[in-house]
Image (tube, rainbow, N blue to C red):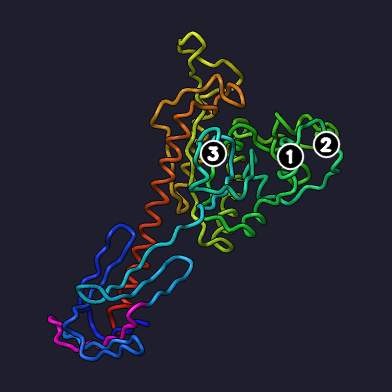
Amino acid sequence: MLHLVGNQYAPLTVQKERLLFRVPLSAIIQSDQASNVVTMKLQDSLSNQKVICIVESVSTYSNHNYIINIRACSEGFKVEVKVKETSPVKVAVLGSCVTRDNFNSQFNKNYKKLYECIALQNQSSIISLMGKPVQYKPEEIDGLNEWDRWNVKTDLDKTFLTNLQTNKPDYLIVDLFADVLFGCIEIEKQFVTNNRWKLWKTSYYKHLSNFTFIHIEDDFKYYMELWSCAINQLFTFLKEYLPNCKVVLHKSRFADKYIDENGKLQTLVNSINVEKLNRYWEQLDDYIKQHFNVTIIDLTGNEFLLDRQHPWGLFNLHFESTYYHHFLRALNEIVLKDRIAKQSSVRKALYKEVVSNN
């Protein structure tokens, strides 16, 4: 084991993923070859304080993040700290396909080398997510394929927060598609996402009575009252139960331009008012930016085109592949900066441990 007592003696240098600390051989005053232990007395040229160092000639120490080797070299003794290969970054998605598709090999071929998507809540309003579980008969969630049935059931069950607690993602990536496009249904002070693509096909929905549609376009003030309360609850939950999970807000927006089979620029004509819904989306994003500590992936400065050959079909959030590549690069930058900052603090702690009387 390496023991250093006193102030800094030699600089610690960084070479890619390695940290190097050198001690001159001339400082050796005692060597016990039988036990492979060397005792050195060092003189700090700045403070003139003595430093005592005992080094086993070859020693290796390890934990889940680092391998530390201490060995003799031509210039003295070298302490080498190498960062281990790490497991993929764990991400969770609270949003829609415009976020989840970034963690799909059809869109980002090699994403699994870096990321693992460990939890997903798809197309659910924040108001619904933070509400109480809704009772239903499983046989009433019918008329759907398995994927759509899972979407509806998880919106009713409200199990996503429990999944987050269990899986402990490094990053939670949020987009607000469902609150902008779908809104909610209020049923006796309980809320479900008004997912007209999926929920409306089920017997559960067809048998509903005494319910109210709530949409951001119909009553913005009331919707914001419900939504702001729910988003505050979400961040309170994250702060209490997942303090090490970083929230990334994905600022996506609806688009309507695509290239047709003849190579001509076309406008997608459907029931979505792109300009109007994007204004609402901006206001929801702004609320989160102003009230919570989040990191933002903002791709709204680029005019990405829709993809008429998108696996899920031509729609206002189904972009060409460049969108997903830009997203992943932006996320890579966030993760890299966080890792550098974290390792910097770890390296400072290691440095202090190695070279100071701590």
Amino acid type, callout 2 = Tyr
- Mark with earlier residue (2, 1): 1
Marks 2 and 1: which is nearer the front? 1
Residue 18 drawn at (x, y percent): 32, 63
Residue 47 in the magenta stretch? The answer is yes
Residue furthest top in the image: 262
Residue 333 in the magenta stretch? The answer is no
Q: In percent of the image, x 78 and y 29: which residue is there? A: 201
- Mark with earlier residue (2, 3): 3
Depth check: 228 or 105 in front? Answer: 105
Please say if 333 is above or below 23.
above
Q: In percent of the image, x 42 and y 38: which residue is there? A: 298
Judged from the image, the secondary structure of the residue bearing numbered disc 1 is: helix
Mark 1 highlights which residue?
152
Q: Are marks 2 and 1 in contact (CB under 8 Å)?
A: yes
Mark 2 highlights which residue?
204
